Image (spheres, grey):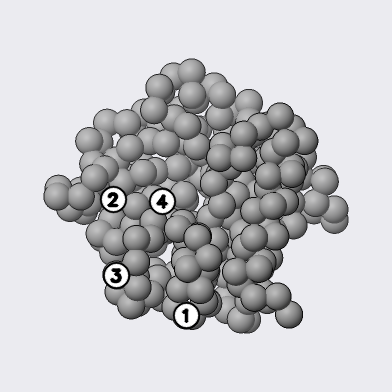
Amino acid sequence: MNSIAERIKEVRNEIARICNQHEREQNSVKLIAVSKTKPSTDIASAYHAGQRDFGENYVQEAIAKIMQLSEYDITWHFIGPIQSNKTRDIAEHFAWVHSVDRAKIARRLAEQRPTNMPPLNVLIQVNIDDDQAKAGVSPEDVAELAAVISEFPQLQLRGLMTIPAVQAEPSDSASSFLAMQRLFLELQSQYKQVDTLSMGMSADWPYAVAAGATMIRIGTALFGARANTPNNTGDPA
C-alpha cells in the first residue's frame, strides 16, 4: 500500500494533468485534505509531504487535533454541518468555514470571532440539486445570504461550496458543477473579494475542476478508507 506521502504526490500529479487538460494553472486549484476520523499522526505525515490545508467535519474531534498539531503551520477548514452551539469553537479555531447556510449561523460566527484574529473566510453552502439529504441554501437564496455575510467585518465572504446529489456515475455530477460555476460567476461579479469555488471530492473532482473549482476536498484518495463514523454531510470526500 502506498504511503500518505506517495498518495499526495499521485493526487497532485493528477491535478496537474487535469488542469493542463483544461488549460488551467495547477496553482489555481487548492487541495483540501479531508482528515475527519483520521489520527493526528496521519495529518502530520501529510504535512511533512507538503500538505498545508486540512478539512474537518466534527468540531470536538477537530479541536483536539488542532491542539495536538499547534506547532504546525496548518490552515484548518471546517467543512461539516454547523450546529448553533458549536459556532464559538469554529469561530475561534478555524481559518475557513465552507458550510454556512443560514443568516443565524453567519451572525453567531461573526459575533464570536476573536477580534485579534483575521476575518473568518466564509463560503456559502449551496444545495445545487435540491437534495433533501444535503444541507445548503437554494441557488435563489444565495444573494440574500451573501448580503448578510458581507455586513460583518469579522467575516470575509470568499465564495461558494456544494456537495452534489449522489450519482450512479461521477460524470453525472458535471451538470451540477456547471450550474455552480454560473452561480459563482454571478456572485463574483457582485463582490470583488469572491475567489473560491469549493466542489469536487475523491470520486468526481476532475469534473469539478473542469467546471472551475478552485478548491477540491479529498480524503479517501489521500488517507485511505475512513472509519465508520456517522456522517451528517453526505460528503464522502
Give the numbered dot on residue 71: 3
Please identify, in this view, whether the residue under mark 4 or under mark 3 is nearer the observer: 3
Q: Residue placed at 26% from the left, 43% from the top?
A: 119
Report which residue position mark 1 lands on.
41
Task: Compare residues 110 and 159 and report the one nearer the observer.
Answer: 159
Give the residue number, with chain letter if any, for mark 4: 97
Q: Position of residue 41 (x, y in %)?
A: 47, 80
x%, y% of residue 225? 68, 76
Horizontal side of residue 212 vs 123, given as left or right: right
Contact between labelled residues 4 and 1, with CB atoms less than 8 Å apart: no
Q: Amino acid at mark 2?
A: Leu
The quarter of the picture where residue 147 lies is top left
Badge 3 amino acid:
Glu
Query: Measuring 74% from the left and 44% from the top, which residue is drawn there?
Result: 17
Pointer 2 residue = 109
Between 194 and 50, the one nearer to me in the picture:
50
Residue 138 appears in the rendering: no
Q: Amino acid at mark 1?
A: Thr
Q: Give the foreground label among 3 and 2.
A: 3
Q: Secondary structure at mark 1?
A: helix
4 or 2: tag closer to the N-terminus? 4
Residue 184 image offset from top left, x and y in percent: 56, 29
Residue drawn 61% across and 72% down? 4
Q: CA distance from mark 1 to mark 2?
A: 29 Å
Give the Cα separation between the discs numbered 4 and 3: 22 Å
